[in-house]
Each structure stands twice: as C-alpha cells, then as structure tokens.
Image: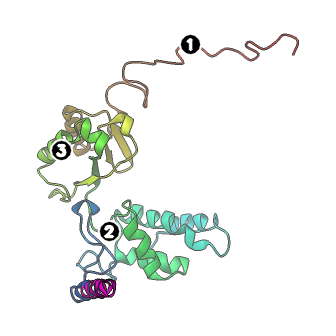
Amino acid sequence: MLTIRLNQCLRNAVSACVSNNIRSNAIGTCSTLRSEGSLFNHRDTPENNPKTPFEFTPENLKRAEAILNNYPEGHKSAAVIPILDLAQRQHGWLPISAMHKVAEFLNMPRMRVYEVATFYTMFIRNPIGKYHVQVCTTTPCWLRGSSEILEAIEKHLGIKVGETTKDNKFTISEVECLGACVNAPMIQVNDDYYEDLSVKDCKEILDDLKAGKKPKAGPRNGRLASEPAGGLTSLTEPPTGPGYKVRSDL
C-alpha cells in the first residue's frame, strides 16, 4: 500500500512539473549562451526569429553539398553537425532561421536539428561579439589560476560572463574543459587556443585583438606545445638507427 501511494505521489509530482513547464513555455528550441545556465528554450527577438534572413552563399552551398557527399545514402542526416557549423561560421552565430535552412537542406525534421543545436555548446544561438572569449574554469585550470584569469578579462573588457561589449567586439563565456589541461590555465578565442596564461598575457591578447592584430596562438610561456615546462625528461637523445641491438646474423 505504501509503495502504491509513493508511486502515485511521484506521478502527481511529475505531472505537475510538466504542466508548469508547458504553461510557462519553458520547453522550447533554443537557449542563450550556455555559460548563463539558461534553459534550452527560444524566445523570438528582432535579431533571432524564423524570419531572420539566412541563405547559404553560393560558395558555402557548394561546401555543404561536398560535406553531404561524404555520407552514404540513408545517413545524410549525419551531416547535420558540420553543416550547422558552416551556417554558424557564415552568420557569426546560429539563428533559428539557419537551423530551419539546414533542416530543409538535409530533408530532416526541424526538431531533430534543434536537438543537435541545443546539445552541443559549440553552437551559439544568440548574437555574440566578433571575438568569443571562452574561459575554461574546470578543475585543472582552476587549480592553475583560472579565477584570476577570468576576473582580469572581465575587468579589462568591462563586462561580465555572458555579456558583450558595446562595440560588439567581445563576448565572454565561462566554459567546461577545453581539453588543454596540461597547458592550464587557458582560453579559447574563436578557433584559437591561448595557453599557459598569466594575467599579463590575457591583457596583451585582448589589446592585440582590439587593435586588429592576431596574437600568436599556443603556449605563452615559451614551451613547445605541451612539452614539460622544465624541459624534456625523456627522449633527450637522437633516436638510434635501424637494427639497433639486433643480431648481426638476422
């Protein structure tokens, strides 16, 4: 009897939750910057609505067709991620009208495209600045000072996480692991990684971008890629030639 009552209570709670979500329109197709922790919903705005102009350029349409040809018949919808990325690169971010165009191009339901676009954080579904500054604050970067890095970037640009500068040049996002833990702390600006950062490095990077320059990507402490910061600890000699320690009669 107790189990039945508990199950009934659980069903009532779930039903009430779903009803409240539907009444408040909390279930939708698009969200703001993921760093704000917002729901995955869409609200039409003057900049982002189904009538927002979007058409693939002739050049990008050829690219989309080339991408599609990489996938066998019956599996063309698997091209949705690279083609959404192509649309975002063309527009600067991914409006809902671009999602509709991708759905039309791939002949797949719009909801399937929404599901992909709302799942992957690489898709930005609201306007952002020219330079998208993504600051990793996951454990390895945090241990190496990402909190100070984020604070310095916010102070230098005069905005907070999720905001865009008035000149529409910079948007800041706080993100999860970007996969460069050995080079912590690090940030990503558009497609480039800037690693082994100090507060001074961040200010220099931002100042270069403001001036229209392209800062050199990669580690800022002088090391190559992810080699040990104190120098090599193994493979310090030239490799031996073929046949090393092999019997002479073989």
**Quarter that holds the N terminus:** bottom left
Q: Amino acid at mark 1?
A: Glu
> x, y (%) of residue 46?
23, 78
> Sequence order check: which comes first, mark 1 or mark 2?
2
Q: Main secondary structure of the magenta part?
A: helix
Q: Which is more toward the observer, 140 or 128?
A: 140
Please say whether residue 10 is one of the residues in the magenta stretch.
yes
Q: Which stretch did the figure color magenta?
A: 1-16
Query: Which of the pair 247/199 is nearer the observer?
Result: 247
Residue tagged 3: 153
Q: Label 2 amino acid? A: Arg
Check if mark 3's residue and mark 2's residue have beta carbons within 8 Å.
Answer: no
Q: Earlier in the sequence, mark 1 or mark 3?
A: 3
Tell me the SS state at disc 2. loop
For this orientation, the residue located farthest to the top is 248
Measuring 62% from the left and 72% from the top, which residue is drawn there?
A: 75
The numbered disc on residue 237 is 1
- Report crowding for label 3: few under 14, some 14 to 19, many 20 or more residues within 10 A (C-alpha): many
Asked whether residue 129 is drawn in magenta, I would say no
Q: In the figure, 171 relative to 62: above or below?
A: above
Above or below, 182 relative to 137: above
Residue found 15% across the figure and 41% down from its top? 152
In percent of width and height, residue 11 lies at 31, 86
Quadrant housing the C terminus: top right
Please tell me whether mark 1 sits on a helix, a strand or a loop. Answer: loop
Q: Which of the labelled discs sits on residue 125, or is there none?
A: 2
Q: Residue furthest front?
A: 1
Q: What's the distance in space between the residues labelled 1 and 3, CA to CA? A: 41 Å
